[in-house]
Each structure stands twice: as C-alpha cells, then as structure tokens.
Image: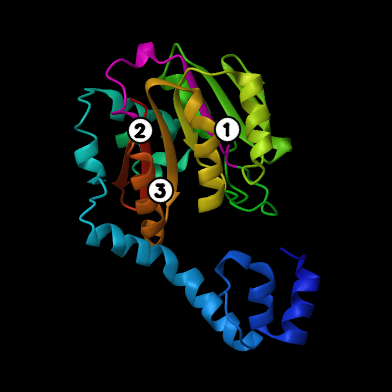
Amino acid sequence: MKNSLSTNWLVFKSGVGKYLIKNFDIFVPSSAGDSKTLGKFTQLNINQIFPLLSILLSKLKIKINIVPIKKFSKIVKSKDGPKILKKNFNKYQSDKSSVHNYHLIYGSLFKNRAKVKKILEIGLGTNNKDIISNMGKDGKPGASIKAFKSSFLNANIYGADIDKKILFKEKRIKTFYVDQTDISTLSKLYKKIGNNFDLIIDDGLHVSNANINVILSSLEFIKKNGYLIIEDIPFKTKPIWEVVSFILSTKYKPMLVKTKQCFVFIIKKN
C-alpha cells in the first residue's frame, strides 16, 4: 500500500478505480476495460467475496459452530472461575469484564486453574493514541495479563505488543515486542518464549489478516487441550470467520462465541 501522500495524489489524479486496481491485485477482474469499470468490479469483489463464500457453506449444509457466551460458560463447569476472573479484570481495570463479558469465557476454560502453566496475550492495551487499536489515554497497559497472573497462580504469563514503551517485567510476567502484520516477529517471539501454552490470546490489532497471522504462527505452540482465542471480532465480519472456522475444523475444534459486543473465536487443540 502506498503512503498516504502518494495515495491521495493517485486518487486525485486518476480516480478511485485506478487506486483500487493498483492496490488490490487479487480482487481485480481478469478482463479488459477502463479503470473506472474495473475499479467498480474490484470493489464489488472485495465486499462480496466472503459473504458469497458464507452462502456457499450454507448451500453445502456446512454448519459453523456459533455458541452464545452463557451457553459456552456452562460447557466446562467451573464453580468459581468466572467470578474470580471478573474480580481480577475489574481490579486491574481491564475492560474484559467491564465492557465485555469475557470473564464468562476465561473463567470457564479450565476445570482446575492450578494446572495452567503458561499463558500468552498479544496486545497489552497501549494508551498511546497515535498507535492503532489503542485503549485511549485512560487505558491501563498490562491490565489483563496482571489479572491472569492473579487468577492462574501457578502460571507464567507472557505478553507482547507493538508499543515498546509499555513493555515491562515482573514476577511471573515477561513482555516482548511483536508486530502482528509481520509474521516474522511472531516467529521470533516463540523462539524466545517456547511452547506448551495452555492459552494464547489475540487482543491486539483487531483486523482479520493480523488475526490469521497469529493463528498461523501459534497453533503449534499450544499444548493438547489448550486454547487459542481471538477477541473482539465485529459481527459484520462473520462471513470471514465462518470460512476460517470451516478450514480449521478438519484438525481442530473451532467455534464462534457470541458475546454482548462481538464474536470471540476459540480454537481448542485436540
């Protein structure tokens, strides 16, 4: 993608059609035509491809597992897990309970929290407003990994973020730099922190390509019966995640959990 100045100049000089053709190669029709017409069909292709794939799944009677969060929280009967996670999310001012109801997920994953040994969360909650996907000036970087530390008392907690200024280290917590759009930085991260994770969470850059980079990089580093969780998936992107879920279902147990604000995508390793 061109920088904003050259992009603006391209759009001004040649129109949106030529901009789309130049920047979205795989969606451009393999047809003759002027840039305005080709640009129009490129835009249609971008907007329609995943909804059409979703319809195709439906036509083939392939059902994607979508579970309401309250039903999910009853799959693993943890008596006190959700309450403890909610208490700790609120204590450290994470929005996982106050804005979302994710305590119902994280408190229900494991019957015995004492057996959880390794957790990684990508996205620490930067409060730098110049960085995309920030938490705003009142955000509390590291809030959720501190909550996980207080909830899983025998676990080492790892965190990663693109904002190097918020990285920190304390007892049972280590944090590292990562850029989810650059898959090589995810590979370097796992070389540092190893494998056998009970839980890996993506709460970083909330965009599908970055999420899929995390999936591609992380699946081999989860232990048996461990989980990979993608947070904050907009309802409007459901068709994308139906396709991802279908692909993964051949070897894993994926599901979309419907929360009060969005979807959460959960992969359990068999």
Residue at the spot of label 2? 251
Q: Residue at x 80, y 72 (%)?
A: 6
- Image location of residue 56, percent across then percent down: 30, 62
Q: Tell me where the magenta segment starts and ends, as one range.
A: 106-125
The first of marks 1 and 2 along the sequence is 1
Residue 191 occupies which quadrant of the picture?
Answer: top right
19, 118: nearer the viewer: 19
- Image location of residue 232, percent across then percent down: 44, 49
Marks counted in the figure total 3
* Label 2 Cα crowd, 10 Å radius (few <14 / some 14-19 / many 20+): few
Q: Residue at x 60, y 49 (%)?
A: 134
Q: Amino acid at mark 1?
A: Gly
Residues tagged 1 and 2 counted as in contact (Cβ below 8 A): no
Residues tagged 1 and 3 counted as in contact (Cβ below 8 A): no
Residue at the spot of label 3? 244
Q: Residue at x 58, y 29 (%)?
A: 159
- Image location of residue 245, percent across then percent down: 36, 45
247, 129: nearer the viewer: 247
